[in-house]
Amino acid sequence: MQPLNWGIVSTGRIAEQFVSDMAAVNNGIVHAVAARKLTDAQAFAQRHNIDKAYGSYQSLFEDQDVDVIYIGTPHTFHFQQARDAILAGKHVLCEKPITVSSEQCRQLSTLAKSRGVYLMEAMWTYFLPAIQQAKAWVDEGRIGTIKHVKADFGYPIEYNPNSREYNADLAGGCLLDMGIYPIAIASYFLNRNIDYWHVNAELAPNGVDKDVIMLAEFGEAKATLATSFQCKLNNYAYIIGDKGYIALHDFWRAKSCELYHLEERVDYFEDNRTTFGFNYEAEAVGKDILSGKTESEVVTHDRSLWLQQQMERVKTFF
């Protein structure tokens, strides 16, 4: 079967990493890239040996040789770009958060289903081998019943109201940028709704969140989650059961996982990959599309909508 032709929206850092990882994908190749400036797209295409470069996103969407679009632009552009791509009949993999509101997420889901095209939020963490191994240990009962999840993700980013991270007009703030990952990892392993949120947030001078600490109650299980632009956090996730726990270092891009019973490490997994890890989600998307699916079984539309709704609940505390 012919590999899928991918079109890339953006020439930024994440797009660079994604395209580099596409070299490890068996069912897809990068065929074209688009940017607001043609010169940027041409330079990107030259660096990555891409056939076509466009100076407008709509030109990319109208390219009949492109099967699936990857969107790696800032958050506030996702909705319109994904919508335009879907209306052009393209499958879409859109960086997280897929939109900046649950209503936008709901609209994209409805549109994709009506047009019969594939749509997935690029929650690449779920597809990493280390995360898959950790999930297998949980499913095998090796840590017993999960009672607690601890996860945090933070790096110091100097305040600049014009930067992507702090710009309110670009939906800046640590919650959407990094905090989505702790919430996502907790929900992935606990797989149930959140009954209550308890949140403490610190805001930058322009009102954008720069530090958020969250306690979520998933029935009898609890999750303590944190994200920050003020400091480097531990950047671990711990999945804690009544018989043991799993430790995931840099969990959003995890290369390894450790299984403990009390203080003793009883198992260890490492994937030894040479990529950033985006290739796993791209391969999964390609497999789904080539098999005729229009929705991922891992990152469902409902899961993406649920994540948006939870972040909206957290924001009510700001």
Image (cartoon, rainbow, N blue to C red):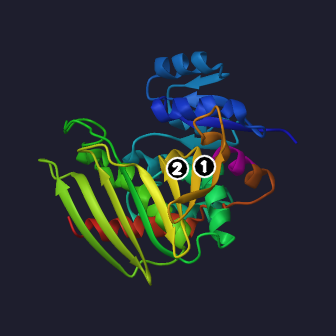
Q: Quadrant of the N terminus?
A: top right
Neighbourhood count class around disc 1 (C-alpha, 10 Å): few under 14, some 14–19, many 20 upward: many
Neighbourhood count class around disc 2 (C-alpha, 10 Å): few under 14, some 14–19, many 20 upward: many
Q: Position of residue 94 (x, y in %)?
A: 53, 48
> Which quadrant of the structure image shows residue 222?
bottom left
- Amino acid type at mark 2: Ala
How far is mark 2 from mark 1, CA to CA? 7 Å
Say how many tags the image has. 2
> Which quadrant of the structure image shows residue 170?
top left
Q: For residue 158, say whether it is visible.
A: yes
Asked if residue 318 is among those painted magenta in the image, a careful observer would answer: no
Q: Quadrant of the C terminus?
A: bottom left
Under circle 2, the secondary element is helix
Under circle 1, the secondary element is strand
Left or right: where 145 falls relative to 183 = right
Q: Position of residue 150 (x, y in %)?
A: 41, 63
Q: Position of residue 234 (x, y in %)?
A: 36, 49
Q: Which residue is mark 2?
A: 82
- Amino acid type at mark 1: Val
Q: Main secondary structure of the magenta part?
A: helix
Q: Position of residue 44 (x, y in %)?
A: 54, 21
The circle drawn on residue 92 is 1
C-beta proximity under 8 Å, tags 2 and 1: yes
> Which mark is first along the chain, 1 or 2?
2
| Residue displayed at 44% across by 84% down | 220
Q: What's drawn in magenta, residue-wise? A: 281-286
> Which quadrant of the structure image shows residue 145?
bottom right
Q: Residue furthest left?
A: 205
